[in-house]
Image: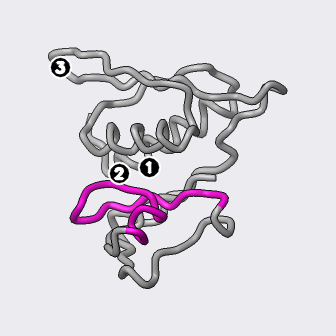
Amino acid sequence: MSLTDPIADYLTRIRNALQAGHRKVDIRASNLNRAITRLLMDQKFIQDFLVIDDPVQPTLRIYLKYTSEDKPVISGLKRISTPGRRHYVGKDNIPRVLNGLGVAVLSTSQGVMTDKRARKMGVGGEVLCYIW
């Protein structure tokens, strides 16, 4: 199976699992997906994750996080840069999601990082997605 936009697939799988109330979701494990998942873990949007090694295609199992009222911690995911329209920003134009309450995920020359870290390091890059 060939995916045109693996990041959109990643976000859609998480969005669908949250809407269905699932506690975990399995996603293809690419280096970019692992980096985004680590970022979600660091920002406390997900509970935990593990990599299931398979000789054909490794899989990421992401354990989703819910509040005590069974509401998902992640309330929104939006793909910004697509294969047909890339969205690059300089260090001075890094967007803020919900006035700092959300996170913009950037792919920079220093690796995948949040908007706050990119601002602190003084680097720009491709805006992959927004998470809030």
Look at the image and say whether residue 113 sits in the magenta stretch. yes
**Where is 21 relative to 109, above or below?**
above
* Marked residue nearer the N-terminal end (1 or 3): 1
Q: Decide which of 50, 18 is in the foreground and name it.
A: 50
Q: Which residue is under mark 2?
A: 5
Quadrant hosting residue 15: top right
User: As drawn, is 50 to the left or to the right of 25?
Assistant: left
Kind of residue indicated by mark 3: Val
In the rendered image, residue 55, in percent from the top left (x then y), is placed at 15, 16
Circles 1, 2 touching at the beta carbon (< 8 Å): yes
Please state the horizontal and vertical placement of residue 116, each as a whole percent of the image.
Answer: 48, 64
The structure's colour scheme is: one colour
Q: Is residue 111 above or below residue 59?
A: below
**Residue at the image position 55 percent from the left and 26 percent from the top:** 47
Instruction: Name the image quarter holding residue 85.
Output: bottom left
Task: Residue type at mark 1: give it.
Answer: Ala
